[in-house]
């Protein structure tokens, strides 16, 4: 075996494989350089998903002729002034590999002008071959243009995705960088996407939320709560969505360390743990959190793409993020996602209702007198003046009356109208409480709401002095599979913390001797079987606290007011008042909203009053 020195061109192409994985990687490196140069306005233009063209223009400080000539050389950077700077990196780019790596696999051109220079300078790099700097016409700042990316390494092109997919990856990179710097204006344009501009926002939380709303949507802005905490030189800021505003995947979690977008398992785990008490399985929170830490306390040099970091004190970071999120969610515990009310109003609109088939009020046996048939849409519109012939009137075809649609109306208490959840006015379908406020109405799911109340009582009782138990006069014997019996008996101590005392009763049964008094009269057999199913899904590595929360949530579900139970006016109002003072009452233990609020203005628009 012969050892030989690799050529400079091959070394650059190998480096390009690490740094420039796809067009989005090149965009990330170039935009980061622009931010490090102090740019306040950055424009990104792409074509072919970035494969045919990437152009990044900024109004930063620019470069002198000498700096430009050196910038496309390997490991040349302005970000590190001494060897000690590597231990305290405060910039986004510092490796000095971006421009030479990109230039080794594409046709690269750079134009720049520094304030100290009489004119701009430009140079080109094609497949690693650099030209001499030459005078150019350009305003202050820098423009980097990349054409025919990977043309010098055709094998890499085989692994490229479609232009649409690569363009979306570029958009996601720019979105993340735009979220990290709301003080900078970003413009993203290209043939594969509509032109978009995110204007610079004012400093402070309001400006940050405005930028996040522009990128993540108005729904996130309306359902976000502010997160802010600091300890021992570590700070976390940002916004987290309410537990009732969730996503089907974790792509809605945006995490930053010193304004650097990262995908760090430690941070993701802290977010997941903070929401564990709120979200159902398969749903993920939407957050945008910004961690600020002394550069000496974090290592950003652990990955060529700089997407991963390593903290000197990971426990401190995890606990601060977890605590900050829990404090913010508890502070806004009474809120439910606004999207529920919007969806409810939309469902009421006539356009959202399809004509019902199989029933016509004109042919009903209870019709008081015969009615002439109206023409259908396909017939002549000569009788168009007959309003019920209009297609939009299909919303009134509600079908035969349902026996379960019972409404118990209640006179409102005047002083209760000013409460956040108002005064109970009716119970619909023996499950939904309709309450009136000064400026709207609220629909409450009585089972989901009471489930959260019981859950919070159980947790408070455990933290205080333990859950009070009630001894069954005759122990209830529950037969089940032997494996389930073993699981329950092995967790008997944990179940006992919440007042459920059971023991093995032969190979295929357990005897329930005591139940939590908070739950009142319950079906102990159904509760034990549900717990056995949950235990089968537990991971042994799951922390004890999380396991206990699962136990409490299951017990709360069985001890809450069931759907179909008729409530008195006093009971409904008592439920509303307790919701207003109970933490996290805006969602049940499974992450579903406990109530939907409709503003009077929305209802008036629905009926054309506004």
Image (cartoon, rainbow, N blue to C red):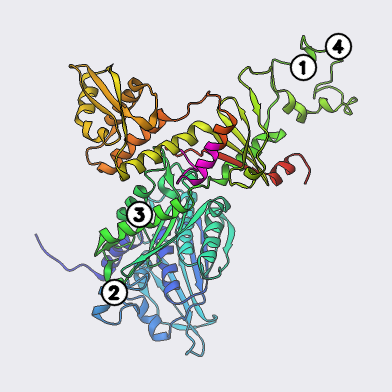
Q: Position of residue 398 (x, y in %)?
A: 70, 23
Residue 495 appears in the rendering: yes
In this rendering, the label closer to the viewer, 1 or 3: 3
Marks 3/4: CA distance? Answer: 68 Å
Q: Position of residue 396 (x, y in %)?
A: 74, 26
Task: Say whether marks 1 and 3 touch (CB < 8 Å).
Answer: no
Q: Nearer the viewer, residue 98 or 154?
A: 98
Residue that numbered label 1 is attached to = 361
Mark 1, residues whose alpha carbon is within 10 Å: few (<14), some, or many (≥20)?
A: some
Marks 4/2: CA distance? Answer: 87 Å
Q: Is residue 162 magenta?
A: no
Residue that numbered label 4 is attached to = 370
In this rendering, the label closer to the viewer, 3 or 2: 3
Q: Position of residue 229 (x, y in %)?
A: 39, 63
> Along the polypeptide, which appears first: circle 3 or circle 4?
3
Residue that numbered label 2 is attached to = 88
Q: Is residue 583 magenta?
A: yes
């Amino acid at each position: 075996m012969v050892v030989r020195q690799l050529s400079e061109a091959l070394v650059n192409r190998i480096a390009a494989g690490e740094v420039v994985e796809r067009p989005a990687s090149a965009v990330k490196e170039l935009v980061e350089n622009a931010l490090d140069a102090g740019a306040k306005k950055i424009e990104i233009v792409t074509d072919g998903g970035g494969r045919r063209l990437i152009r990044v223009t900024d109004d930063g400080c620019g470069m002198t002729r000498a700096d430009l000539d050196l910038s496309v050389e390997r490991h040349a950077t302005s970000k590190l002034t001494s060897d000690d700077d590597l231990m305290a990196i405060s910039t986004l780019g510092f490796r000095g590999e971006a421009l030479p790596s990109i230039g080794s696999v594409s046709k690269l051109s750079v134009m720049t002008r520094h304030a100290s220079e009489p004119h701009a300078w430009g140079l080109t790099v094609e497949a690693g071959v650099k030209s001499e700097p030459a005078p150019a016409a350009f305003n202050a700042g820098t423009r980097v243009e990349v054409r025919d990316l990977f043309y010098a390494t055709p094998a890499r092109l085989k692994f490229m995705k479609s232009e649409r997919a690569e363009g979306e990856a570029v958009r996601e990179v720019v979105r993340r960088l735009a979220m990290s710097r709301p003080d900078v204006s970003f413009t993203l344009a290209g043939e594969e996407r509509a032109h978009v501009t995110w204007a610079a926002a004012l400093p402070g939380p309001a400006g940050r939320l405005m930028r996040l709303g522009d990128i993540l949507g108005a729904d996130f802005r309306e359902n976000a709560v502010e997160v802010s905490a600091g300890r021992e030189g570590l700070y976390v800021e940002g916004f987290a969505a309410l537990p009732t505003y969730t996503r089907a995947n974790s792509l809605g979690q945006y995490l930053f360390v010193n304004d650097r977008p990262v995908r760090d398992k430690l941070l993701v785990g802290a977010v997941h743990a903070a929401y564990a008490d709120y979200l159902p399985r398969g749903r993920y929170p939407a957050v945008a959190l910004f961690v600020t830490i002394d550069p000496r306390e974090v290592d950003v040099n652990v990955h060529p793409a700089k997407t991963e970091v390593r903290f000197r004190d990971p426990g401190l970071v995890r606990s601060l993020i977890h605590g900050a999120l829990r404090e913010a969610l508890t502070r806004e515990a009474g809120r439910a996602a606004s999207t529920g009310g919007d969806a409810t109003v939309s469902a009421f609109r006539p356009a959202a209702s399809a004509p019902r088939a199989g029933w016509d009020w004109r042919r009903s046996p209870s019709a008081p007198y015969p009615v002439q048939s109206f023409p259908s849409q396909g017939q002549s519109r000569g009788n168009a003046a007959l309003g019920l012939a209009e297609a939009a009137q299909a919303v009134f075809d509600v079908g035969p009356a349902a026996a379960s649609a019972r409404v118990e109306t209640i006179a409102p208490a005047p002083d209760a109208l000013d409460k956040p959840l108002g005064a109970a006015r009716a119970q619909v379908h023996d499950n939904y409480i309709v309450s009136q406020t000064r400026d709207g109405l609220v629909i409450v799911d009585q089972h989901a709401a009471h489930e959260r109340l019981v859950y919070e009582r159980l947790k408070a009782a455990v933290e205080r002095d333990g859950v009070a138990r009630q001894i069954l006069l005759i122990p209830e014997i529950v037969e089940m599979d032997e494996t389930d019996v073993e699981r329950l008996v092995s967790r008997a101590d944990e179940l006992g913390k919440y007042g459920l005392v059971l023991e093995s009763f032969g190979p295929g049964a357990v005897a329930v001797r005591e139940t939590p008094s908070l739950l009142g009269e319950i079906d102990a057999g159904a509760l034990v079987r549900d717990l056995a199913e949950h235990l089968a899904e537990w991971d042994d590595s799951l922390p004890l606290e999380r396991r206990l929360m699962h136990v409490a949530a299951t017990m709360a579900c069985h001890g809450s007011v069931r759907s179909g139970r008729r409530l008195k006016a006093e009971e409904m109002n008592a439920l509303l008042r307790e919701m207003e003072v109970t933490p996290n009452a805006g969602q049940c233990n499974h992450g579903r909203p406990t109530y939907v609020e409709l503003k009077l203005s929305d209802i008036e628009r629905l009926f054309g009053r506004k």
